[in-house]
Image (tube, grey):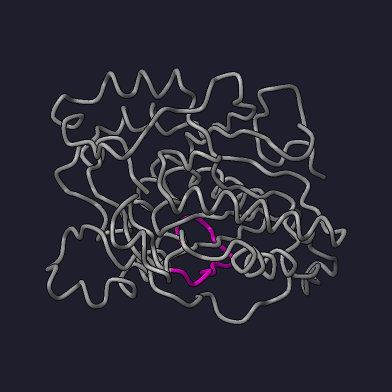
Amino acid sequence: MGRPGDCRRGVAAGSGRRGGPHHPRPRPRRNSTAGRSVAPIVGTLLLVHAHPDDEAISTGGVMMKAKSHGHRVVLITATRGEAGEIYNMDEAKARPHLGEIRTEELRAAGEILGVDRQEFLGYRDSGMVDTPDNKDPRSFHQADLGEAAGKLAVFMREERPDIVVTYAEDGVYGHPDHIKAHFVANAALDILEREGLPAKKLYYTAIPRSGMEEFMKQMPEEARRMQNPSMRFEGTPDELVTTRVDVHDYVERKRQAFAAHVSQNDPNSWFTTMASQIYELAFGTEYFQLVRGKAGSDLPEPDLFAGIH
C-alpha cells in the first residue's frame, strides 16, 4: 500500500493461494482439569486487502484488538507483490523470487497481527495507472469481476464473517488494485446475501479528511516532493467516518508488523524514520466508514464489533 511520503509505484503479485487447507472454526473445548467447556470464538473479522503490507498500516490495530477479544481474524490478499521497488536486499537476486519473499513477509506480519487464516485470490498486482503491469491480463485490475467475486465468496462461505473490511471506491489513493478490491468485496457480499448468508457489517477503511490535511502539513517538504503524483491522498469526508477505534495499545506491534515487510520498507523514508510519539499520534486510532449493517452504538462507534453478540 502506498503511504504519504512513499514514492514507490505499486507492487505486482503472482498467483495462487496460501494458508493451507481450510479448518473449521474451533468448537467449544472441554477443559480436562476443570471439567467445563471453554467459550468458543465469538465473531469473525474478514479483511480484503490488495497487497502484502496493506493489512498492517490501515487495519493492523483492529486485527490485533479483535484477536485479543477472542475473535477469529481472516485475511484475504488479492496479490503477492512481485514487482515494485525493492529495499534492504539485492534487487537482482530478489526480483525473480519477490513474490515468494513478500509471501513470507506477509506470513511474518500475520503472526504479529494474530491472523488465523490468510489466503490469496491469485492475481498479479496491477501497478499504477498506465503502467505495463496495469495492462497485464493476469493483473487484478484486469480480472473479470464475477470470477474474482466468486473466488472471494468461497472463502466467505467457509468463514461466515460477521465483519468485513475493505476499501472505499476511491481505493484510498487511487490504486487500481484497491479500487478493484472494493468492487470485488461488494460483489462477493452480494452473492452471499442472495444465498441468505449476509455479513452483519461491511466497513471501508477511512482517513478523516481533516486528519489527512493536518498530516500532509506536517510532512517534510522533501517527502512531499517525492510523493508519487498518481497517488491522490484526499481522505474521507469527516462526516462519513462512523467508527473510530482506539488502538494505542497495539501501535508498537502494528509498527513491528509493518517492519516485517522488509522488502517494502525504505530505510530512509520519513514514514520509516518517524519518531515513536509521532507514529502513535498518527496511527493510534483507526477509522472506518460503516456502509452495510447497523451501527452497534451511538456514533462514532468505538469498535468494529460494537453491537455484535
Q: Position of residue 228 (x, y in %)?
A: 24, 40
In the image, 289: left or right of 53? right
Q: With respect to residue 190, does 153 lie above or below?
A: below
What x and y, as percent, mark residue 129? 34, 49
Which x, y percent locates residue 227? 23, 36
Quarter that holds the C terminus: top right
Residue 47: x and y in percent read 58, 54
When asked about the image quadrant of residue 296, the answer is top right
Decide which of 62, 133 is in the foreground and name it: 133
280 versus 105 height, above or below: above
Q: Is residue 265 above or below residue 212?
A: below
Q: Nearer the viewer, residue 237 or 180?
A: 180
* Residue 97 shown in magenta: no
Residue at 55% across, 62% down: 76
Residue most extreme to the bottom: 21
Q: Magenta segment, which residues?
A: 111-123
Count every numbered label the image shows and give the total.
0
* Residue at x 45%, y 54% (from the top left corner): 177
| Residue at the spot 43% in from the left edge and 21% down from the top edge | 211
**Can residue 113 be found in the magenta stretch?**
yes
Residue occupying image coordinates x 14% and y 68%: 91
